[in-house]
Amino acid sequence: MYKNEKNIFLVLWFLILISINSYAIDFISNYEPSLSLSLKNIYFIIELIRFIIPFLILIYLASIFLFIKKKNDKFTLFFFIYAIWQLIIGNILNKQGIKINDYQITISLICVLLIFYISYVKNYTDLYIKFLYIFIIFISLIGLYFTINIYNEFISRNDLYYFYVTQTLGIEESTFGQPNPRVTGLARNLVIIFYFIFYFALLKKNKIFNKIFFMIFLFFLNFSIYATQTRLALIGILIILIFYIFFIKENLFKKYCIIVLIFILPIISFELLIKTKNYHLSKQENYDFDYFDKASKNQNRIFNKDTGSSGRTKIWSNSLKLIYEKKLIFGYGPQSDRILLREYYKNNSNHLVNYNEDLKFGTNSSNAIIYSILCGGVVSLFFLLQIYYLIFVKLNNFFFKIKKNENFLKYFLITSLCFLVFRSIFENSFALFGIDFCLLCLSYYLLINSNKFIKKNFF
């Protein structure tokens, strides 16, 4: 029975992952029903199933939760109150009402909490490792699929130099009936995969052939991450570089070689690739080389000072004004940052053109703390800060009790937590359901049970 239930939990975890970013209501509203067997109909059914999955999973998990002996778990409790409060206050104060999409994303978050909590209560801690591997495979497949598509676009488009301006991940593009991820989301996935493979290749005993393969793959990953020109992803690479330099003890010469091969050479190689593409285009189309060189520099967001900011400071400023003007003590419900910012732009724009210009900044609050205030006021803020405290306790325990030869998974989990905390400054991150939230739950529960894994030789 236990084995069957464990297998069910693995299936539920996978189903929750594939439900991420499902927006069935938008899809249904634009859907014209027909009885023909077409791709559009198939995509509609898949999207509908993805959207319904969390509701069905919640019924199953709730039926188990009601009859198990409860254990104290602050992480689950804090996030549960954080999410439920947003639903409660949204139904009371949000005049537009909470959309079913907002219910779905909150229920998905609760489902993830219940999967980990019930596994913890029933001592199914061996599942956490399997959850992690399913998660890594899942984001790897997504990352590989879209990265290959972007490289195809890079080859076919003469005016594409850096992936940040790719049309493959444009707002209007979709895959299997759902909107494509943003390039920042793709870069985030590549960084997480980089972390896992880097520590696995470095700290696990591998055959020399496997190590060479991993080094080549890491080179390609960092090559692609730099090509995205997303600053948070590059900071993510800087975080693991700092970990490698200061916390992993090994031969200095080997360290220098790894730094050059994995961290420096990919950047140089991609810049050389850009120069080569410019040169061949200028020869092939008889255009001025300087013209192409200037075009590539204009797309470079890392080394080009003229690209400016991403607009986050403007979004934060507008969000804080909103909080002050509306006196958002209680919040407006899940994902209300999108509603409130759009409303703010409309009320503070003198002309439609100005309104559309303001919308370009986005309606995403781009900060986990600001998001928690807009959606749940001081209540959600309080419990999110408690989550931060639990994370910092784990980080503190690691840094002050670090062993000489820590396991590769522990390094991966701690580095991931650091990356997520940093991302939460510039993105909503784990403040709502998504890849970041799932990784946070994985990292936290694996760390609090790390001693059990070491004894059972899982780590």
Image (tube, helix red, strand yellow):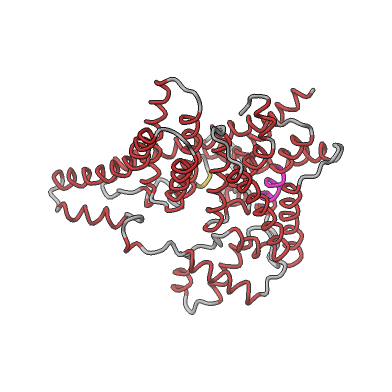
Image height of 115 relative to 100, above or below:
above
Q: Is residue 396 left or right of residue 355?
A: right
Q: How far across and down, in percent of the image, does residue 43 sit?
A: 55, 39
Q: How far across and down, in percent of the image, does residue 253 sit?
A: 35, 34
The image quarter in which residue 425 lies: bottom right
Image height of 199 relative to 456, above or below:
below
Q: How far across and down, in percent of the image, does residue 260 sit?
A: 33, 39
Tell which of 66 and 350 is nearer to you.
66
- What secondary structure prevails in the magenta region? helix
Q: Is residue 220 left or right of residue 336?
A: left
Position of the N terminus, as image quadrant, is top right
In the image, residue 217 lies in the stretch drawn in magenta:
no
The image quarter in which residue 256 lies: top left
Q: Is residue 220 visible?
A: no
Total label count?
0
Magenta span of residues = 104-111
Position of the C terminus, as image quadrant, is top right
Image height of 62 relative to 332, above or below:
above
Tell which of 139 and 354 is nearer to you.
139
**Looking at the image, which residue is at 58% across and 71% down?**
320
Q: Is residue 120 visible?
A: yes
Q: Is residue 135 left or right of residue 332?
A: left
In the image, residue 110 lies in the stretch drawn in magenta:
yes
